[in-house]
């Protein structure tokens, strides 16, 4: 029989790497107001509660990915109407990074639909990292699996963060991806950590998983040798043509519970309210900030799907008195002009 849990101790904000499923389950399922109070109290011990970090995403190589991730519009295994693109030119990436900086983002994240980078592609990405960093932006890339050698090359180029998600629990994982294993993912994260790069790792909820799988994902992240410095919690963006295109929509309270649980068990990590905001009202997003989310993807596009307009985010920040972290200007001063015509891009959810 497992030990009875003491919620006061679990909610106290100790930094631990030995969380049991029973403990995580107890945190996640406690009365909502207690959960929010604990998460917000812990959040305040380590962060300014009125600041949110802003990262802008760019897909530098889109589509035709050899992996079969069931949620992903970019997998070559499914027909989502997305056309295959070449690796973007360095100049184009730099001009997107300049725009992101002008709009107030402090981190620029570049994503590529690869199983793992080929040497000649990696050398181009290394140059992108160097140039984006020299503009005074933090850098993040997500390129699939990495060897230790590749991780060292990225570290030498000055990369700040590497994003590689565990996505779900080890048990549910087999239902979602068959072309690479959970172990492969943990190995890549180990290589990134060993190279001294900050780890950005989280997952997706709303993929038809049981709540048990959410506890399992949190347990895997929180019991790593070091908590990931950044933990993106994505709500599935259901894309027609993928195996998860028709999955039932997640309840927003469950999403907030997940954010709060991540905050409580990983007190010092940035918890990112990630994909899925386009489908959330401002009240749900506000609850996520109260629950300890302190990072967002900022800018009208994620990788291939839509994200709220920068203007709408700044409007919400102003209403809430939130300042974009590290930005030289407050949300009050920051005005992002709404483009007359929204820049045209392929939105995989609108195929
Ligand atoms: N190919 C690389 C990889 O998988 O490591 C990098 C890009 S991949 C798109 C980055 C992450 O985006 C995935 O691990 C997944 O967690 C998230 N993601 C992809 N499609 C999504 C969707 N439809 N809804 C929510 N999150 C998604
Ligand atoms: C993460 O956890 N979420 C981002 C980022 N890391 C790379 C990606 C979300 C992708 C959503 C679907 C799309 O736009 O293609
Ligand atoms: Fe490829 Fe990454 Fe999409 Fe999986 S999540 S199909 S690895 S781009």
Image (spheres, rainbow, N blue to C red):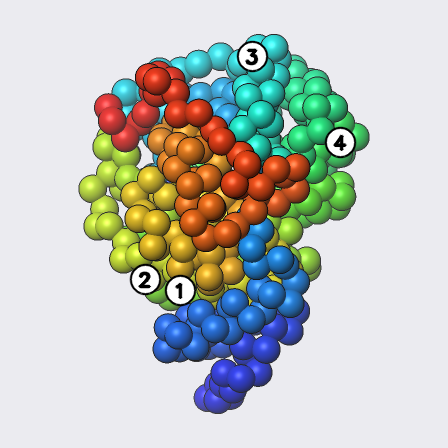
SS for callout 4: loop
Other residues around mark 4 within 10 Å, as few (<14) / some (14–19) / many (≥20): many
Q: Position of residue 186 (x, y in %)?
A: 59, 49
Cα separation between marks 4 and 1:
35 Å
In this rendering, the answer to whether 11 lies above or below 180 is below
Q: CA distance from mark 4 to mark 3?
A: 20 Å
Residue depicted at x 79% and y 30%: 156
In primary-sequence order, the first of circles 2 and 3 is: 3
Please tell me which of labels 4 and 3 falls first in the chain: 3
Res. 158 mark: 4
In this view, the mark in front (4 or 3): 3
Q: Position of residue 183 (x, y in %)?
A: 55, 49
Task: State the residue at coordinates (42%, 33%).
Answer: 311
Question: Spatial distance from mark 1 to mark 3, Cα to Cα?
Answer: 39 Å
Tell me the distance, in whole angstroms, between the alpha carbons under discs 4 and 2: 39 Å
Mark 1 burial class by Cα count in 10 Å: few <14, some 14-19, many 20+: many
Residue position marked by numbered label 2 in the rendering: 253
Q: Classify 10 Å Cα crowding around label 3: few (below 14), some (14-19), many (20 and above).
A: few
Q: Is residue 169 visible?
A: no
Q: Which residue is mark 1?
A: 257
Q: CA distance from mark 2 to mark 3?
A: 40 Å
CB atoms at circles 2 and 1 under 8 Å apart? yes
Mark 2 neighbour density, 10 Å: few (under 14) some (14–19) many (20 or more): few
Q: Which mark is residue 92?
A: 3
Q: Nearer the viewer, residue 30 or 167?
A: 30
């Amino acid at each position: 029989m497992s030990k009875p849990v003491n919620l006061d101790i679990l909610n106290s904000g100790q930094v631990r790497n030995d969380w049991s499923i029973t403990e995580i389950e107890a945190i996640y399922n406690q009365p909502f107001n207690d959960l929010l109070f604990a998460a917000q109290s812990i959040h305040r011990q380590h962060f300014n509660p009125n600041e949110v970090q802003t990262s802008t995403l760019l897909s530098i190589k889109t589509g035709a990915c050899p992996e079969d991730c069931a949620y992903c519009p970019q997998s070559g295994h499914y027909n989502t109407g997305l056309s295959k693109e070449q690796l973007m030119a360095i100049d184009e990436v730099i001009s997107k990074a300049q725009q992101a900086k002008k709009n107030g983002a402090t981190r620029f994240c570049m994503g590529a639909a690869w199983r793992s980078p080929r040497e000649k592609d990696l050398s181009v990405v290394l140059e992108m990292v160097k140039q984006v960093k020299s503009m005074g932006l933090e850098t993040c890339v997500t390129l699939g699996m990495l060897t230790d050698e590749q991780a060292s090359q990225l570290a030498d180029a000055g990369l700040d963060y590497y994003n590689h998600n565990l996505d779900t629990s080890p048990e549910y994982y087999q239902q979602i991806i068959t072309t690479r294993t959970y172990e492969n993912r943990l190995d890549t994260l180990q290589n990134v950590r060993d190279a001294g790069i900050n780890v950005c790792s989280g997952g997706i909820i709303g993929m038809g998983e049981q709540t048990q799988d959410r506890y399992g994902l949190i347990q895997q992240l929180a019991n790593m040798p070091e908590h990931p410095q950044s933990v993106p919690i994505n709500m599935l963006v259901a894309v027609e043509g993928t195996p998860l295109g028709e999955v039932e929509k997640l309840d927003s309270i469950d999403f907030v519970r997940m954010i709060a649980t991540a905050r409580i068990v990983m007190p010092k990590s940035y918890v990112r309210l990630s994909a899925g905001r386009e489908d959330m009202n401002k009240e749900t997003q506000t609850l996520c900030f109260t629950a300890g989310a302190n990072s967002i993807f900022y800018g009208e596009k994620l990788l291939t799907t839509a994200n709220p307009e920068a203007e709408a985010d700044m409007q919400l920040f102003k209403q809430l008195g939130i300042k974009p972290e590290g930005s030289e200007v407050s949300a009050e001063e920051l005005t992002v002009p709404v483009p007359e015509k929204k820049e045209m891009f392929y939105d995989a959810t609108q195929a």
